[in-house]
Amino acid sequence: MTTKPAAAAARATVYGYPRQGQDRELKKAIEGYWKGRVDADALRATAADLRRTNWHQLAEAGIDEVPTGDFSYYDHVLDTTVMVGAIPERHREAVAADPLAGYFAMARGTQEVAPLEMTKWFDTNYHYLVPELGPETEFVADSAKQVAELREALALGLTARPVLVGPVTYLLLAKPAPGVAADFEPLTLLDRLLPVYAQVLADLRAAGAEWVQVDEPALVQDRTPAELNAAGRAYRDLGGLTDRPKLLVASYFDRLGDALPVLAKAPVEGLALDFTEAAAGNLDALAAVGGLPGKRLVAGVVSGRNIWVNDLGASLATLGTLLGLADRVDVAASCSLLHVPLDASVERDIEPQILRWLAFARQKTAEVVTLARGLRHGTDAVSAELAANRADLASRATSPITRDPAVRARAAAVTDADARRSQTYPERTAAQRAHLGLPLLPTTTIGSFPQTGELRTARAALRAGRIDTAGYEERVKAEIQEVVSFQEKTGIDVLVHGEPERNDMVQYFAEQLTGYLATRHGWVQSYGTRYVRPPVLAGDISRPEPMTVRWTTYAQSLTDRPVKGMLTGPVTMLAWSFVRDDQPLGETARQVALALRDEVNDLEAAGTSVIQVDEPALRETLPLRAADRPGYLAWATEAFRLTTAGVRPDTQIHTHMCYAEFGDIVQAIDDLDADVISLEAARSHMQVARELAAHGYPREAGPGVYDIHSPRVPSTEEAAQLLRTGLAAIPAERLWVNPDCGLKTRGWPETRSSLENLVTAARRVRAELPA
């Protein structure tokens, strides 16, 4: 079928782009700045070069309107905090003395001052810095960053659109500042914040902005009538300004629901909506409100979150339907391309046939441009691209890589009994306490220890062929020996082997499971300068042989204390991979769970008495709409239990979660039926301990007392005070003592001092307990 050209010339755009550079130049420059090897001017120059490179790539690919302001040294929400002048009191002196150093102090903290809390950006693995607000907060506009980056793009002769985090989303993401009543609602500050946005918009207009994109992804979540009224008021006020650019209000990650009619009737010039499968319902809802007559619609029809090639024919059909619903329809990815790697064409280790199925940021940009051209000029103008796309889609659909009959038969045979422990928790805990003989307030760590320079050098030498596998494994054994020896001397009760053999908590396992593909350059920002390479889950999953047993049993041979076996759970294996989109997630989760179940059983058979199955992504992957959550939680908790339920009652199952809002899933945490859970709590001041207590959580828990995402070393008394706060919610016989998360990203000096203080704090508080 031939599609006719669109009445108005469709433009191609994106909402944001990866920041790091092809070789992670930004990460290297920032970490060099932190270490004093790169000065501020050199860091700024690197950042400016990366922005120019990104804009040139976009323009050369055919993007008609490039985004500005989406670039960040650490986090775009933190950038917004700076833009609106909401600097926490404890950081104001540092920011005033040196804005760049003060910015990083807010993100990472210093030895004297704690950083801002960090949590997940909606249902992604990107972390943002949580704004701290209170009744006394005063906002002051600082548009310098946004104006400067706009002018950089305009100076290159580009059509540019600044991107801002919207005022409603900013306030809904914020929390009460320390010392402010917990029931304070930051959204009450909206009328105080809107004049600041008005000033920023006026500054951008004066600098040459025709359009400004205002991101409001919080409106795709369930919102109260009061919150929707606040959104309506915000855009009536901003839309009513006379000195402003045109406003494009953007949403993504899900359907807008009740917020769509609110924004549709607001006096703004355009809306950007997600029209991928993740936001099913937006098209019908848009038609139901009568479309957007007289306005611009930016249609996100290319997924900004997965790495599979787009179905161009289906997307063009969607775009054709949208043509009658707005004054003009432009084409975009569904969200910022921040969430995918930069360029699939540089991958050399993936078979060419499979590489045709993949689209990273640069390939997605090309898809957006092709779709815009097809919408402008009709399908005949892109017939070659459509034919090649159909061939790629057919290649994937018929490939034997994607289906393994044995795996599917095993998954289909699973029964409810397979996902239940043989005894109840009270029966199990008695057996475990007798078997392990741990003290009150037992100490442990989450799993990983610092990856030393010697280890990284050995890994690079192995890849380059300068040493053989035997030489590399001797280095790994030496690292394990050091980690075990340190833990014994420090007095930690349940040890770990430190995970020196692991490059990443998901990639390590993915490389040993069938059905997964690993990339060499597929880096994606998780937070700050922390980048990960999510593996690609392309086919059915199985475990050919044990993955962790060898190293765990080696560590156990070095000590009489229990050593935890460490695995990444099935939900996190999916969430931190680029998961297949050709079958329901629950089916894929069951396959991964069965592969991990084999590993858990082999660890137990080898003598491992404590096994930790990490699920930090359980909350992260929670659907944004409440109506979609029960189905997700049903398969997610079943997958964890399927992984862990085959062990004896006296084998203690741990799990771990970090940097998310756990209050939303306490019942699901209970449903996991783990014996012990460790959770991030240091930055959030033991909030999770109170949430567990309010739920009546009956099992053992270790809310963290050491924030490992900051270089500062917590004092013994600081850790002890957090423990006392934890004891107010969780009884001593069920409270563990541990860091917030793994220690891979920390250095050995701070790790030693912090863990020594943690153990001393546990002993101090233990001595305070009644006899």
Image (spheres, helix red, strand yellow):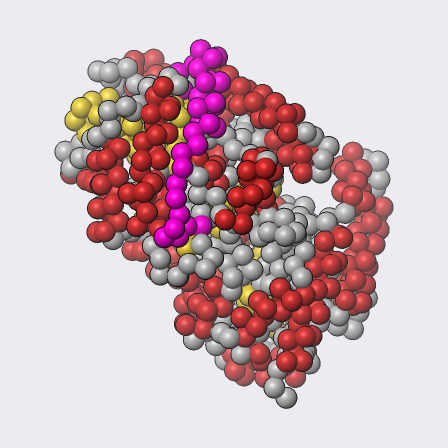
Q: Which residue lies furthest to the bottom in this view?
A: 771
**Image: magenta residue range:** 132-160
In the displayed structure, does residue 642 sit left or right of residue 455? Answer: left
Residue 94: give x, y in percent of width and height: 58, 42
Q: Residue at x 65, y 25 (%)?
A: 42
Q: In which quarter of the image is residue 650?
A: bottom right
In the displayed structure, does residue 408 sit left or right of residue 205? Answer: right
Q: Which residue is drawn at 49% across and 47% down?
A: 88
Q: Does the magenta stretch include residue 152?
A: yes
Q: Which residue lies furthest to the top in this view?
A: 157
How many discs appear? Answer: 0
Quadrant of the frame with the N terminus:
top left
Quadrant of the frame with the C terminus:
bottom right
Q: In which quarter of the image is residue 253?
A: top left
Residue 67: give x, y in percent of width and height: 42, 25
Q: Nearer the viewer, residue 247 or 285?
A: 247
